[in-house]
Amino acid sequence: MKKLKRSGRLVDMTYYLLQHPHQLVSLSYFSERYQSAKSSISEDLTIVKEIFESQGIGSLLTIAGASGGVKYVPMVEEEEGKLLVEKLNQKLEDKERLLPGGYLYMMDILGSPRLMNEIGRLFAAVFSDQKIDAVMTVAMKGIPLAYAIGSYLDVPVSIVRRDHRVTEGSMVSINYVSGSAKRIQTMSLARRSLEEGANVLIVDDFMKAGGTARGMMDLLKEFNANVVGIGVLVEAEDVEERLVDDYVSIARLEEVNERQKLVNAVPGNFLKKLKEVNQK
Amino acid sequence: MKKLKRSGRLVDMTYYLLQHPHQLVSLSYFSERYQSAKSSISEDLTIVKEIFESQGIGSLLTIAGASGGVKYVPMVEEEEGKLLVEKLNQKLEDKERLLPGGYLYMMDILGSPRLMNEIGRLFAAVFSDQKIDAVMTVAMKGIPLAYAIGSYLDVPVSIVRRDHRVTEGSMVSINYVSGSAKRIQTMSLARRSLEEGANVLIVDDFMKAGGTARGMMDLLKEFNANVVGIGVLVEAEDVEERLVDDYVSIARLEEVNERQKLVNAVPGNFLKKLKEVNQK
């Protein structure tokens, strides 16, 4: 790579760091990449850090010592988080998404990679101080959000299935009771798709009573894995008894009334959690 | 937003452009964002453009005139593309992925958001000069790649299902013959998940005879949509009769031998297509 001036280094460095979130990059790496002295690289990083932090892009952690370097941690400022939650709620309240039976059509939201990335960054920020080895979700609607989060945390995604496939190799299955319908269902995860003892963030697009999340927690026990947290995009209104109590939600449906063609969405507990993390 | 110096503008501008691929950003937007003269912004963009292009990040197209601005188009240099294809093939040739029946376990590859993003960028680059309104895939293994591509092209993703769900609203279904097993199957797409007349890029993780891709093409006819292209991660070896002939593949399985515990993967036609696009 040819020698770059500061202005060029700043552009390329920003690109490189954004492509490698949560990874420790050594000063030597940049120093060789740009054929520049470590002292110049240090000064560059000071500028990048200042802008990342003042513009709400994220933190740039500096780890001192011989094995040290910098690590970009995607973060979100409260103000930006608030705007995003409001944007999502406005979308949710569009009465066109009401389907027969009071179900909500969500694929316009889940089908937008841009929106999924924005929301993925929210979750990555709120769980940024936890040790996470994998994101787990259940096919299929949780997948887009799980990948967005996995991307910002730089960890793999494990996809739980409700069916068996020959292309998964040996699978671990459990039965669970779906909380709302009280039906017994099966979910399975390929044995090799998650390491024993992994620290796992559970993600789903929607949570009603939490039966699916509960099922995923049970499944994780079979892998001796630890549940670091649960993140859901939307939680349902009016749930008598939740099967999980510790989760982060972006939005909460306060009321869904098919007859009156009304959807009322309020912010979930995400903003509170974000505030806690940002104050640390 | 407070006034930024050039060095700060370069960092934030790089971030902003990377977050908004294939979107036209006006000079006025940046000029207001940084409270700086358009002439300064123009100079900044010249630097960003030079680095984006020399480092193989992508092109920065400049559109002149009152409604003009800049557009970041993710691109990939041949050398980088080659390395990625090689990396994928090495992974594919790991004999540990052989499953009974000669199937290949792929979830370690498909489960990596980082790898999916890297490969998504390859497809976004090779289709960068086409007008694409949506990416379409079939649940579930094509989803991660489809979102990665959709993200770089900044277009929504439509997910075709093999089952019916109450949460999809009205759906359009077709029957198709899976090319390899010669079985009649059904696939469906929510009516409102794709606009009439859209220009669509079809994406899948694996293609054998191409029956699924053919099915998606038939389904698109029901939406009066146009197939812009077909992208598959891996194409199978030894197919007697392909049902589709125009597609881009990253890797091709030359030989899969269960008894000898052998997987032999070669590059697909992607690199040839990339060369053509980059020469334009």
Image (tube, coloured by chain):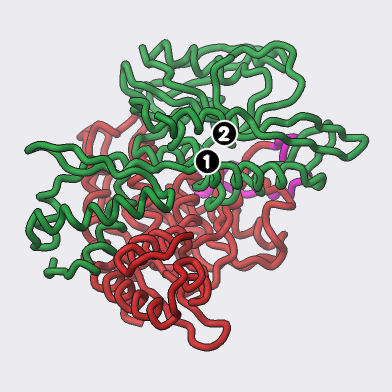
Chain colours: A red, B green
- Front position in the image: B43 or A18: B43
Q: Identify the residue position indicated by label 2 in the image.
A: B271
In this view, the residue in front, B159 or B30, is B30
Residue B108 rendering spot, x and y as whole percentages: 66, 49
Q: Earlier along the polypeptide chain: callout 2 or callout 1?
A: 1
Task: Place residue A47 in its image quadrant.
Answer: bottom left
- Label of residue B78 in the image: 1
Q: Residue at x 41, y 11 (%)?
A: B222
- Pointer 2: residues within 10 angstroms few (<14), some, or many (20+)? many
Find residue B183 and report its horizontal and vertical position in percent. 69, 14
Residue range highlighted in magenta: A164-186
Q: Is residue B13 left or right of residue B90?
A: left
Residue A185 in magenta? yes
Q: Chain of mark 1?
A: B
Q: Residue at x 45, y 38 (%)?
A: B149
Q: Secondary structure at mark 2?
A: helix
At mark 1, the secondary structure is: helix
Figure quadrant of residue A100: top left
Amino acid type of disc 1?
Answer: Glu
Residue A254 drawn above or below residue B159: below
The C terminus of chain B lies in quadrant? top left
| Residue B52 lies in the magenta stretch | no
Camera-side residue of B23 and A80: B23
Q: CA distance from mark 2 to mark 1?
A: 7 Å
**Residues packed near mark 1 inside 10 Å, few (<14), some (14 to 19) or many (20 plus):** some
- Residue A94's place in the image compared with A58, above or below, is above
Answer yes or no: do the residues labelled 2 and 1 have beta carbons within 8 Å?
yes
Q: Residue A13, position in %: x, y? A: 39, 65
Indicate the amino acid at tag 2: Leu
